[in-house]
Image (tube, rainbow, N blue to C red):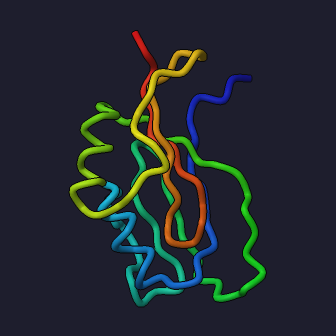
Amino acid sequence: MTIEALSAITLFVRDMSRSVPFYQTCGFDLIYGGPDAEFTSFRAGTGYLNLIDNDSSQHRDWGRAIFYVDDVDAQYQRLIDAGIQPDAPPKDAAWGERYFHLRDPDGHELSFARPLK
């Protein structure tokens, strides 16, 4: 058995009305729910990114979601232009990817990456 793709990831968020525009700005296509919904789903390539409203203050850091994009530097610039501040500019990693990280409004770490050729 081989895992071929990430089908979906679901994140708990404290403020759906803040999170939905953030993910739309990052380039995710809204397919269900929205800023006033308790559950929202975005298309992420062939998979999905889901958000569930959870206003609990017990939210903990959980790890990172990695999304491959066609152009890491263009994605970085697009986010900078939209006022989103990634942790650092894109860089090439020893493991063979170009990537950068950022945190969403609830502190989830996201990485946008592309394999180096």
- Residue visible at 49% across and 49% down? 87
Identify the image quadrant of the N terminus: top right
**Relative to the observer, which residue lies in front, 61 or 23?**
61
Residue 90 coordinates in the image, percent (x, y): 40, 34
**Relative to the observer, which residue lies in front, 75 or 2?**
75
- Residue visible at 63% across and 49% down? 64
**Relative to the observer, which residue lies in front, 65 or 105?**
105
Residue 114 image-quadrant placement: top left
User: Where 61 falls versus 102 (above or below)?
Assistant: below
Position of 77 with respect to 23 (left or right) is left
Identify the image quadrant of the C terminus: top left
List the single residue furthest toward the front. Answer: 88
Residue 25 image-quadrant placement: bottom left
- Residue visible at 51% across and 85% down? 15
Number of callouts: 0
Residue 12 coordinates in the image, percent (x, y): 63, 73
Residue 75 coordinates in the image, percent (x, y): 30, 43
Residue 6 image-quadrant placement: top right
- Residue visible at 50% across and 45% down? 101
Residue 79 coordinates in the image, percent (x, y): 30, 54
